């Protein structure tokens, strides 16, 4: 005799919903009627292993057009916890009136192996016919989503062609009023200044350093970086245009940048970053020009060579340039400029913290400005590193000429002579802004 395999026990949850609160205070209301029908259906399927769960999932006074319902949320939580196998509803619209929401719920049910039944519509996903019906409904839901998406995209494209603002992150220089871009005068002035300075400097790196040193921030209140600058320079909103999928249309808003300034910026951007960097280097004075000498007093002048697309900077002995390499050059023909400059700056940083130089700095600063006090000078010397890093190259070269009397290189190393009076000028420049801010 063949042994019967016991049927799997299916835990069934009855979900009920009523849109209005009318009649919910009655002893036997619509929710009770739905629940009674659901429990009766579960009882009829007892032979298939169906048993009701004890928890109630009722939403009285909630619309079927939203998923934000407490009873439904509790049901979904129990489904995810693996406590429910079958959902029983009186009609499909009790679960949801939105096909899109309905398809989302079905995705959750499928993920956790849960089926559902509509007892008045012969709709049962535990059967092959029920699953076929479900697939047809979901196909229509997918069709509805695609058609809606196409309509939205077509509307956005048509609005863009008319130059209308269609939302999104508001660019710096503008605010939104009545769904239109309007100029923010303070931000617009900053945008114009950024475009103009880029034309003057020709370098996004140098401009970024200058903006950070001046405390410039973007519309989100964060420091401006190079990525922000490149996005700014390529945003055609600033010349009064609206862009959709790469095509520009006349916008409804007012331009901030003139077409001439836009063209100047983009003429620079068309050059390669390497070329722009090379241009910047040639425009920026060498840090040690006129300051560096060999031990025998021969001046070393800035020179540069190019190999392929790369530029190399040097300080070269004037004797070598004049083809007098054998006449007392101390063996120095040329030195790597970057390495020498970094070594000199590091040497200055070390010297500024020595007691001897600190005393000289205090004396020199008081000659420049008698009201400067000793703690101000010490604080300025300690903060020199931060000041130096915030300066752009031309300003670093100016400070170097104030601080350095002479740099001498020899076989034994390098010596840096500081200018005492220049030290006083630099201290005064550093202390005065701090005092003005404190006042």
Image: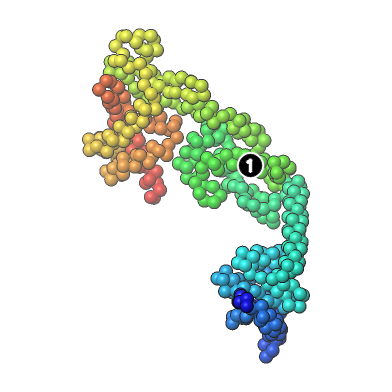
Residue 327 appears in the figure: yes
Residue appearing at x 59%, y 32% in the figure: 269
Q: Position of residue 115 (x, y in %)?
A: 66, 70
- Relative placement, left or right, of 247 versus 323 is right
- Relative placement, left or right, of 171 versus 438 is right
Residue appearing at x 57%, y 39% in the figure: 230
Compared to residue 178, the image places residue 246 above or below, namely: above
Which residue was labeled with disc 1? 235
Residue appearing at x 28%, y 35% in the figure: 350
Q: Closest to the observer: 374 or 227?
A: 227
- Relative placement, left or right, of 76 versus 340 is right
Q: Position of residue 229 (x, y in %)?
A: 56, 40
Q: In which quarter of the image is the N terminus?
A: bottom right
Residue, far bottom:
27
- Relative placement, left or right, of 73 versus 147 is left
Hey, which quadrant is residue 117 in on the image?
bottom right
Q: Closest to the observer: 94 or 52?
A: 52
Residue appearing at x 30%, y 18% in the figure: 294
Q: Where is residue 158 in the image (x, y as percent from the top left)?
A: 77, 49
Compared to residue 247, the image places residue 319 above or below, namely: above
Compared to residue 411, the image places residue 435 above or below, namely: below
Hey, which quadrant is residue 377 in on the image?
top left
Compared to residue 332, the image places residue 57 above or below, namely: below
Q: Position of residue 275 (x, y in %)?
A: 54, 27
């Amino acid at each position: 005799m063949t042994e019967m395999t016991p049927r799997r026990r299916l835990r069934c949850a009855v979900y009920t919903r009523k849109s209005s609160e009318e009649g919910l205070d009655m002893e036997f209301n619509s929710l009770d009627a739905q629940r009674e029908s659901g429990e009766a259906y579960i009882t009829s399927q007892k032979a298939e292993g169906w048993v009701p769960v004890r928890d109630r999932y009722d939403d009285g006074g909630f619309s079927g057009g939203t998923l934000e319902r407490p009873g439904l949320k509790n049901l979904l939580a129990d489904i995810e916890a693996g406590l429910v196998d079958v959902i029983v509803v009186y009609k499909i619209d009790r679960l949801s009136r939105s096909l899109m929401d309905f398809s989302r719920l079905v995705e959750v049910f499928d993920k956790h192996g849960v089926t559902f039944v509509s007892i008045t519509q012969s709709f049962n996903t535990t059967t092959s016919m029920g699953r076929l019906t479900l697939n047809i409904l979901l196909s229509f839901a997918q069709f509805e989503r695609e058609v809606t998406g196409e309509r939205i995209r077509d509307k956005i494209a048509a609005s863009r062609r008319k130059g209308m603002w269609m939302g999104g992150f508001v660019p710096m220089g503008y605010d939104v009023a009545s769904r239109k871009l309007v100029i923010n005068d303070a931000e617009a002035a900053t945008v114009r200044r950024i475009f103009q300075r880029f034309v003057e400097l020709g370098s996004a790196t140098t401009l970024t350093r200058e903006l950070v040193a001046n405390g410039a921030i973007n519309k989100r209140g964060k420091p401006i970086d190079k990525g922000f600058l490149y996005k700014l320079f390529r945003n055609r909103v600033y010349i009064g245009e609206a862009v959709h999928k790469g095509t520009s249309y006349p916008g409804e808003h007012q331009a901030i940048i003139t077409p001439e300034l836009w063209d100047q910026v983009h003429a620079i951007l068309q050059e390669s970053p390497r070329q722009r960097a090379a241009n910047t280097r040639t425009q920026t004075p060498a840090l040690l020009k006129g300051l560096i000498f060999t031990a025998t007093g021969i001046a070393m002048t800035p020179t540069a060579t190019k190999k392929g697309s790369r530029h190399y900077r040097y300080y070269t002995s004037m004797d070598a340039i004049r083809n007098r390499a054998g006449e007392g050059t101390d063996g120095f023909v040329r030195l790597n400029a970057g390495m020498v400059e970094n070594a000199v700056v590091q040497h200055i940083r070390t010297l500024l913290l020595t007691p001897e130089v600190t005393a000289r700095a205090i004396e020199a600063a008081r000659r420049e400005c008698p009201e400067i006090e000793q703690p101000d000078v010490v604080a300025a010397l300690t903060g020199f590193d931060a000041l130096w890093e915030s300066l752009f190259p031309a300003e670093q070269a100016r400070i170097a000429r104030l601080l350095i009397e002479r740099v001498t290189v020899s076989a034994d190393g390098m010596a840096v002579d500081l200018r005492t009076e220049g030290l006083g000028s630099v201290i005064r420049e550093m202390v005065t802004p701090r005092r003005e801010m404190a006042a």
